[in-house]
Image (spheres, helix red, strand yellow):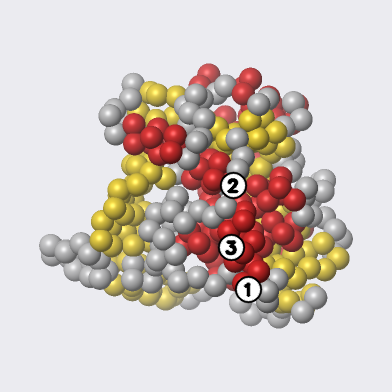
Amino acid sequence: MYDVITIGSATLDAFIETDAASIVSVSSIGAKKEYMSYPYGAKIEIDNFDFQTGGGAINTAANFSNLGFKASTIIKIGDEIQSNKILNSLENFNVDTSNIIKSKNHKTGFSIILTSFQGDRTVLAHRGANANLELSDINFDAIKHSKWLYLAPLNGNSTKVLDDVAFYAEEHDVNLAINVGTSSIKQGKEKLFKVLKTAEVIILNKDEASMLTGISVRPDTKFEKYSKEIIHPDIISMLRELNYEKEKITIITDGKNGAYAYDGKKLYHCGEFPAKVVSTLGAGDAFSSTFVAALMKTDGDIEKALLYASVNAASVVENFGAQSGFLTFDQIKKQLKDNPDFKVYSCKYKN
């Protein structure tokens, strides 16, 4: 039996860092966008280069294992020699690899990550085998004998497995956490909400929550104040809508503003844990998987789970790579002990 199985993507990541990258802001009525730019036609010197593994399923599986849980992952990779790097990486984290599918028809997913001097990144992604996971690839018996199933964002044709996998987990009393991705949201609100109804934990970033609910965070709207902490009313509306049918835990992450949670009874807000940002890649996976792991560890303590998740995510952004910087629970507790003022604010709030 596994403590947790993750399903999602696996990629080979090439990290490229150069001081020649510029950040260009473009404003229009009602919108502002930023672009990473390089001199057109020039040959750019690279200041830093690294080659690592990444992807939502293996980032989270590695983190679950590092936190002391028996973890496995269901991913689809190519059958080329490069895919061995993914297998070796997972084995180094003691993640069970027996449920991984090797495809002779698709190449392993590949990404080029362009990192800016601000620590943020632009990703050029080739989905490859990640976009072609099929129901026949999935070991449902392994899912049935797992305590938790963690669904990372799915891409392309792989989104078609979401419904069957989620309903199977519910039917067999397997706790389900879903990190909703853009591709799944594009399937439509009505269809996706049927899947979300089966989950114990739902995790989205603010942009994804806005896309799914149709609620925008209005910059000209006054905040409502709860328990010494400011929560935007549009964020509250998103949380309420996503937690519409049964009591589940809904998380919305908001970058430098931290993360919000709602369990149908209380609202929670946890700020961003202090960190010197090197790269933000993998921070979301670290936060989400640590939150679920901490729920398992603390018997459902949401406040502790938010604290632990924030600390571990901060450690990841201080390192170059999505699986670098993972902390153990003991290391997380020490960080919190050294920062006693870092707290979660909560208040009662019922729909």
Q: In the image shown, does 69 or 136 lie closer to the viewer?
A: 69
Q: State the residue at coordinates (50%, 36%).
A: 94
Q: State the residue at coordinates (74%, 26%).
A: 172
Q: Quadrant of the N terminus?
A: top right
Q: Secondary structure at mark 2?
A: loop
In whole angstroms, how far apart are the C-alphas of marks 3 and 2? 13 Å
Q: Nearer the viewer, mark 3 or mark 2?
A: 2
Q: State the residue at coordinates (63%, 30%).
A: 2
Label 1 vs 3, first from the N-terminus:
3
Above or below: residue 219 compared with residue 186: below
Q: State the residue at coordinates (54%, 72%).
A: 274
**In the rendered structure, which amino acid carries the disc numbered 3?**
Val
The answer, for residue 184, to whether it is visible in the render is no
**In the rendered structure, which amino acid carries the disc numbered 2?**
Leu
Residue picked out by circle 3: 311
Q: Are marks 2 and 1 in contact (CB under 8 Å)?
A: no
CA neighbours of label 1 inside 10 A, class few (<14), some (14 to 19), many (20+)? few
Q: Position of residue 169 (x, y in %)?
A: 70, 30
Q: In the image shown, does 26 or 126 lie closer to the viewer?
A: 126
Q: Which mark is residue 67?
A: 2
